[in-house]
Image (tube, rainbow, N blue to C red):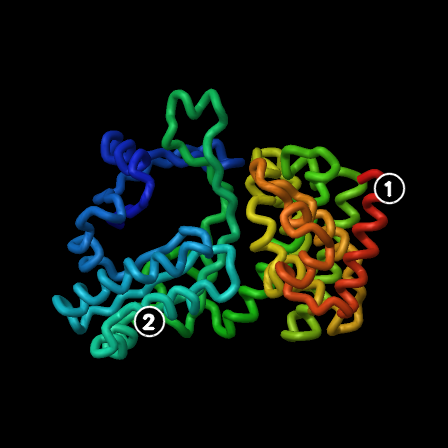
């Protein structure tokens, strides 16, 4: 199926145009797939014709860029609607951010001329998708020979919100439109991303550089399993997921993170700690849900305390930037100072310092 790539990295766009294709190594299968985009453009170039011809679009821009993307999409959608008013477009967000599709929709529709907004909104689906696979840049030796190479986990399905499509419900075979999708997305963020964050931030404190090595650390592995129990208890209580199914999610997540065939650096997984410490994200969110359903989130409390101390790419840690645990708890995590979780995090931070962690 023909596809176009639009990016704001000029060097990457130039390299893709020059090469005409890029290759994907499927990890664990020893298979290399060559992909040839029909069109490659910088976001400031003219890509309107390719956009007009599309029936499906995907975003992968990091959640904090969705507002800016919405303004860009509004201009393109207005032009598309003027030329092809009856043509639907479905946009699937592939961001590790809760409510990414709603965020993008609000930014896009809000940037449209009010006279066009309702008509464009009716023909545009903003669809939440779940990113399950890990994709990585090539290691140094391979990058020298093939800088565009992508290493991808052998997991190609994309669960997405069945109820948000305005065009054909399943235009690609690996899309998995699911009903009641909001619950599925919360499950993914609280289970997959939550366990990942526990491993990453505690692993960083313990000196690990690779996610797989941190996962099998005899101190961290029980903590990761405990986080799965905590998240699962809250999710089962809140949304009625089966216990067997939820345990399978936890087991699959830990198996993925422990896989040495996926050379995934801790730095990539732990990046942007202040976003990941927000109240509805992967650490505080499942911890609060566990408390709501009668389980003390000791693993998540320890990981929250560790994330406060994480320095992302040389930047000050949240704790260094704000000066105190309580400041991080209130200004970043969105907690009230006397909430039970706040007390648990303070205790975990004190224990971590006392143990020399």
Residue at x-position 39% and y-position 72%? 164
Rendered location of residue 209, percent (x, y)? 64, 33
* 254 with respect to 176 (left or right): right
Numbered disc 1: secondary structure: loop
Residue 11 in picture, x, y percent from top left: 31, 34
Give the class, few, some or many, for how many residues have Cα within 10 Å of label 1's Cα (few <14, many ≥20). Answer: few
Q: Quadrant of residue 193?
A: bottom right
Give me the disc on residue 331.
none
Q: Is residue 102 left or right of residue 352?
A: left
Question: What residue is shown at x 50% (from left), y 48% (from top)?
Answer: 155
Residue 287 image offset from top left, x and y in percent: 71, 63
Element marked by disc 2? helix
Q: Which residue is mark 1?
A: 355
| On-image quarter of the C terminus | top right
Q: Quadrant of residue 275?
A: bottom right
Give the camera-side residue of 59 and 162: 59
Front residue of 357/324: it is 324
Residue 196 visible in this rendered orientation of the protein: no
Q: Visible in this render: residue 310?
A: yes
Q: Vertically, is 294 above or below 320?
A: below
Which residue is pictured at 77% across the width and 69% down the height? 338
Q: Which mark is residue 110?
A: 2
Q: Is residue 42 above or below residue 186?
A: above
| Furthest-front residue in this view | 323
């Amino acid at each position: 199926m023909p596809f176009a790539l639009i990016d704001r990295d000029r060097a990457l766009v130039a390299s893709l145009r020059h090469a005409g294709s890029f290759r994907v190594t499927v990890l664990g299968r020893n298979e290399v797939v060559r992909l040839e985009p029909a069109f490659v453009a910088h976001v400031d170039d003219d890509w309107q014709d390719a956009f007009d011809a599309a029936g499906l679009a995907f975003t992968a821009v990091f959640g904090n860029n969705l507002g800016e993307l919405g303004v860009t999409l509004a201009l393109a959608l207005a032009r598309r609607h003027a030329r092809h008013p009856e043509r639907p477009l479905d946009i699937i967000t592939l961001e590790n951010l809760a409510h990414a599709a709603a965020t993008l929709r609000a930014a896009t529709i809000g940037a449209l001329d009010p006279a066009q907004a309702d008509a464009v909104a009716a023909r545009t689906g903003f669809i939440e998708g779940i990113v399950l696979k890990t994709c990585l840049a090539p290691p140094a030796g391979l990058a020298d020979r093939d800088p565009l190479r992508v290493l991808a986990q052998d997991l190609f399905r994309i669960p997405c919100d069945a109820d948000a499509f305005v065009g054909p419900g399943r235009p690609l075979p690996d899309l998995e439109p699911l009903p009641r999708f909001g619950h599925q997305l919360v499950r993914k963020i609280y289970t997959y991303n939550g366990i990942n964050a526990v491993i990453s931030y505690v692993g960083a404190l313990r000196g690990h550089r690779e996610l797989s090595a941190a996962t099998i650390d005899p101190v961290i592995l029980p903590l990761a399993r405990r986080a799965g129990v905590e998240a699962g208890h809250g999710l089962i209580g809140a949304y009625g997921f089966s216990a067997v199914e939820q345990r399978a999610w936890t087991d699959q997540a830990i198996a993925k993170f422990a896989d040495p065939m996926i050379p995934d650096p801790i730095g990539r997984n732990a990046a942007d700690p202040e976003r990941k410490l927000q109240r509805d994200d992967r650490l505080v969110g499942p911890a609060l849900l566990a408390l709501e359903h009668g389980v003390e989130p000791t693993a998540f409390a320890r990981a929250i305390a560790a994330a406060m101390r994480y320095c992302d790419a040389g930047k000050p840690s949240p704790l260094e930037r704000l000066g105190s645990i309580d400041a991080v708890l209130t200004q970043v995590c969105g907690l009230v100072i006397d909430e039970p979780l706040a007390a648990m995090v303070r205790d975990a931070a004190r224990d971590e310092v006392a143990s020399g962690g």
